[in-house]
Amino acid sequence: MQDTRELTKKIAELKKERNAVILAHNYERGEVQDIADFVGDSLELSQKAVELDADVIVFCGVNFMAESAAVLSPEKTVLLPELDARCPMADMVRVEPLRSLKQQHPDAALVCYVNTTAEIKAECDICCTSANAIEVVKSLEQKKVIFVPDKNLADYVARNTDKQIILWEGYCPTHNQILPIDVRRVKNLHPMAEVLAHPECRHEVLEMADRICSTTGMVNYVRKSGSSEFIIATESGLLHRLNKENPHKKFYEVSPYTMCPDMKMIDLKAVVDSLEHMRYVITVPEDIRLRAKKSLDRMLAIKRKR
Ligand code: 13P
Ligand code: SF4
């Protein structure tokens, strides 16, 4: 078994050899975040995929994220170190039932959360992430909006816009199982702590939050906040970055069950193997890629507000 130092050295050598950059989502294992060139939320990672000057992107995240990079930057080789790292919520929506819903509401715009496959993005008018969902929906001309696949994010958007939202019954298993009782339990132990919640959480949990934002939204908020304690209602991987960047502040997990197994599949050995054997290359058929790119490009044209 190689140690972290050895693996890190090997990754640096291979990166140079391949002219590669490593992108990691805020939920990835701490050791993977530490060797990445850039760590961020879904929106930032999509933006980076476009801006980067590299031949190879090693995407440490889940399948839909690597797919988005492949859609946006077809000239680069996009590698996902673990092929099984998929988002269960993204797999809760399929093309045929989505097309029939669309047919039932021909006057509605179709918005897809970035946590969808490229095939689903290709069906949509515009994408959004948790950082810009409200802005994206507000930017639409249509009064009626079909929003897939996260019912909790759709509900959050519906409450913060004047649109009629038709939601899909999808959800993130990690966020959806966070309950008000979890928040109350930690809040009783740390009454001065501010509660930060991700909009993939249920409405009852969001109602208890001092701040609702994406993962990087939380990082930015904590940096500026005068508070010194925070209860974090999102996937546990974010705690690594929060602790690292704010050594004098305290962070509490909302419950011990906020780990997304898919976000923890990639380790340093998998990154080495990925660069060494150039695996697993993520590609998207050209007809789907071009249509999915339209949805992503429309989203990226809307400037980030938070
Ligand atoms: P962010 O939008 O904060 O990246 O979170 C989305 C998510 O759950 C990624 O799986
Ligand atoms: Fe999907 Fe939730 Fe895991 Fe993110 S945390 S990859 S939304 S299951």
Image: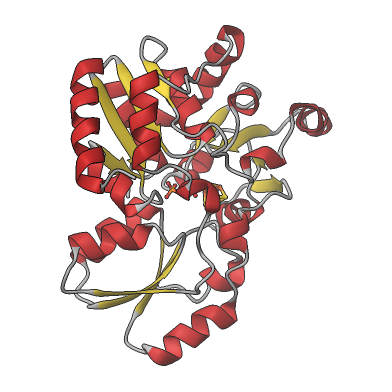
Quarter containing the N terminus: top left
Q: Residue at x 34, y 63 (%)?
A: 239
Q: Nearer the viewer, residue 22 or 118?
A: 22
| The furthest residue to the front | 1
Q: Position of residue 93 (x, y in %)?
A: 71, 37
Q: Position of residue 233 (x, y in %)?
A: 46, 67
Q: Residue at x 37, y 45 (%)?
A: 41
Q: Image height check: is 23 above or below 26?
A: above
Q: Position of residue 128 (x, y in %)?
A: 50, 38
User: In screen coordinates, is 28 left or right of 284?
Assistant: left
| The furthest residue to the left | 248
Q: Quadrant of residue 180?
A: bottom right
Q: Image height check: is 53 above or below 202?
A: above
User: In screen coordinates, is 135 left or right of 165?
Assistant: left
Q: Residue at x 46, y 74 (%)?
A: 254
Q: Quadrant of residue 166?
A: top right
Q: Residue at x 65, y 28 (%)?
A: 120
Q: Position of residue 110 (x, y in %)?
A: 65, 32
